Image (tube, rainbow, N blue to C red):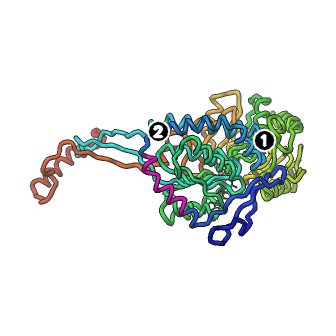
Amino acid sequence: MSTVEQQTQPQPNGAGIATIRVDNPATGATIGHIPNLDRDGVGELVARARAIQPSWEALGYDGRGAIMLEMRAWMSRNRDRIVETLCEENGKTWEDGLLAELLYNLDALGFWARKASKYLADEKVRPHSPFLFGNRLIERYRPHGVVGVIGPWNYPLNNNFGDAVPALMAGNTVVLKPSSLAPLTSLLIAEGLRESGLPEDVFLVATGSGDTGSALVDFADFVHFTGSTEIGKKVMARAAETLTPVSLELGGKDPMIVCADADVERAANSALFYSMQNGGQTCISVERVYVEEPIYEEFVGKVAAKARNLRQGVPRGPGSVEVGAVTYPEQAELIERHVRDAVEKGAKVLVGGARNDADGGIFFQPTVLRDVDHSMEIMTEETFGPTVPIMRVGDAEEAIRLANDSRYGLDSSVFTRDLEKGERLARRVQAGATCVNDCSTNYFALEVPFGGMKESGMGARHGPKGIQKYCQTQQIMVKRFAAKKEIYFFPYRRRVTKGLGRLLGLLYGRGRRGR
Ligand code: NDP
């Protein structure tokens, strides 16, 4: 959680710069201050990153990969410090820091270090056109230059440094703008990279507010943005002014469909865990559940009973609580508004339903709602809190229709014992990913691209596309047998042109037989 304070850091010229105060949302304690970089400050960072980029690229995949592996070892050695920082600035539990964030990054560092050279290898292509026979065609990837990564507060490690790793492995330098609500993990990462041998200026952190992010869009050669759909649209509009390419990972309203033949115990455990994990502040958390009529009562009963056993409070190390804090006051107000709106329209609160602020922290009780429908914001807008609204549906057809009745399309899930049916239903959900009998863990499938459909985003992270996007493609064509002159060069001659016309007729005039 953060607050901007003016004029608190004296500069050599006697002026002051604004700084941002960072608080622990679970306790209200101030845990740091960071500079609020202005436009010039961002410009300077990007210029430094641009100056060093060619030598970073020249280091090659092995050289860059070796540093990433050093960083992996550094992160593993410093895991308690990293997880502590994540918990303090975000209010998440130790387990959310360790298992959802640190683990992902340890794995991703090794993955990109190994795969970058394969995914970005030159592709030799055989020309299909008879007019290009004899030419050597190569498609190659070259880094954009300076990549601006703009990250959200809910995953200060995964959606910040985690998205910088493939950009770095592709040979770009990176300027990262973390959320002003949770910037300290990114600064710790910069320290780790220095100690792991990363050359100066290859990875720089531009701390600051939304304006700092906006300036980064102006200066960077490519922007990877993770955040809300609302700000994502602004980033895209701004990038259009400089024709800077962007990839956008935006909000979600992930549906979970539970069929009557599902393992109800597993489905209930999954609904609870994936809606409450990280306090529900995960882009791919379960935000709404559709359950077929025959098992609705059993499912709702199980989820409610399990939710009553959850412990919430200040995360104080491993095993202390299951649900941590809400990261900032406006987010708690939004959750409160969604629950109130649902109740006013007829939903019933089975567990929780109210704020739980204590000891200077911001908390919302783990909340289970039944009898919800699509007239309620909690079923249509991103809530981003520890809430699980459960709707009764007549059959899977209705569930699919409702799941797709959304402007979002990020992740989703289907629960059934019939795996073929599960896959069939999965193919009909309008979302960037669908899990059968699981949720969210597809984020760890680094081999396949993952990104949102509809207003959940554009582009993808992971898989070959997740690193190729950090590059421009360049086509190289080498003429191996070059005559002094081609037949179609100047001057044009009637006889030659007519001959070429006849050749076209021979090549392309055979209809279906000539395919
Ligand atoms: P925001 O969109 O509010 O902010 C994201 C980042 O953009 C922050 O660093 C923010 O800075 C910065 N920013 C704000 N205004 C601008 C601007 N005009 N130009 C450039 N940058 C700007 O998102 P949140 O931080 O609130 O993150 C939560 C959202 O992120 C949720 O909607 C969630 O679903 C989504 N998300 C999506 C993921 C995905 O993979 N699809 C993964 C994780 C989260 P500051 O914070 O300082 O204002």
Tag 2 secondary structure: helix
User: Label 1: few (<14), some or many (≥20) within 10 Å?
Assistant: many
Q: Position of residue 82 (x, y in %)?
A: 70, 42
| Quadrant of the snapshot with the N terminus | bottom right
Q: From what the image shows, is residue 17 above or below residue 171?
A: below
The label shown at residue 194 is none
Q: Quadrant of residue 370?
A: top right
- Residue found farthest to the bottom: 14
Q: Quadrant of residue 315?
A: top right
Question: Which is more toward the observer, 202 or 483?
Answer: 202
Left of 142 or right of it: where is 412? right
Q: Which residues are magenta?
A: 43-57
The label shown at residue 63 is 2
Left of 119 or right of it: where is 417? right
Q: Position of residue 62 (x, y in %)?
A: 46, 36
Left of 190 or right of it: where is 269? right
Q: Quadrant of residue 235?
A: bottom right
Q: From what the image shows, is residue 293 above or below residue 237?
A: above
Measure how far apart labels 1 and 2 are at the Cα level: 36 Å
Which residue in the structure is indicated by mark 1? Answer: 93
User: Label 2: few (<14), some or many (≥20) within 10 Å?
Assistant: some
Left of 78 or right of it: where is 170? left
Q: From what the image shows, is residue 154 above or below residue 33?
A: above
Q: Is residue 260 inside the magenta stretch?
A: no
Could you tell me which residue is drawn at 51 percent across and 36 percent down?
A: 66
Q: Amino acid at mark 2?
A: Gly
Q: Earlier in the sequence, mark 1 or mark 2?
A: 2
